[in-house]
Amino acid sequence: MRYYPVNLDILNRKCLVVGGGSVGTRKILTLLNCGAKVTLISPDATEKLQELAGNDLISWEKRSYLASDLDTMFLVIGASDDEELNRQISADAEKLNMLCNIADRPEVCNFILPSIVNRGDLVISISTSGKSPAFAKKLRKELEKQFGVEYIEFLQLMGAIREKLLSEKHEPEAHKHIFERLISSDLVEMIKTNRKEDINSLLFDIFGQGYEFENLMETGE
């Protein structure tokens, strides 16, 4: 296996993107969704990036890249259409042992970005190790059909149940069979079709009183 799979916590981390075109825009939006503090280095930028900068959601330096821009950064993404510049960014990052991704150039990256299916806390990553982004995209579209928005509420509910059990001093290991029963039930389909009475009936059968769907979803928000 060429790459080590990992989910990276970048909340409040300083992340640099070089390049303000459509690719840079996509990279920045994903970084922001994960809570990063983003700096853009580019003489120009898309309207979306200009809007983000105008609302102080990103920091935009309207100039060309300098090696010193990497100082204090956690990771850098090269999204320029200048091949030589992208390779220079990679070389500079390597000297600092920094996390570096160059768009569409896996040979000069020390990490690559997978195709993602995002359903709230459910994140499914698909990677072909850079061999076929088109196939990764195809798989993503198939998985998006299989895993709909009902999984957002499903995981919110599971998290709320887990927290309630822990607050009642249940040992985590004792929860295993409970969650296996929930997962093997028709719970996801009940959520998808908004069958709240059936959900509450299932929860009552497993937990008894005090585990009503509406109340659990409020506490899980």
Image (cartoon, helix red, strand yellow):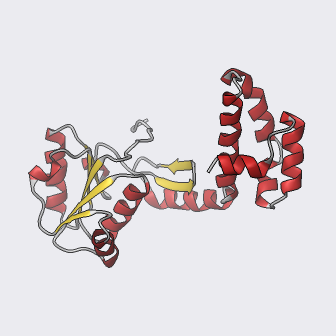
Q: Residue at x 29, y 42 (%)?
A: 110
Q: Residue at x 76, y 40 (%)?
A: 183
Is residue 14 visible to us here? yes
In the rendered image, residue 43, in percent from the top left (x then y), is placed at: 16, 72
Q: Residue furthest bottom?
A: 47
Instruction: Report whether 71 appears left or right of 212.
Output: left
Q: Residue at x 26, y 44 (%)?
A: 74
The quadrant holding residue 32 is bottom left
Front residue (pair 118, 137): 118
Q: Residue at x 39, y 38 (%)?
A: 2
In the rendered image, residue 123, in percent from the top left (x then y), is placed at: 55, 49
In the displayed structure, 71 sits above or below 135; it is above
Front residue (pair 167, 149): 167
The quadrant holding residue 55 is bottom left
Q: Quadrant of the N terminus?
A: top left
In the rendered image, residue 205, in percent from the top left (x then y), is placed at: 90, 38
Is residue 154 visible to us here? no
Instruction: Report whether 84 appears left or right of 53.
Output: left
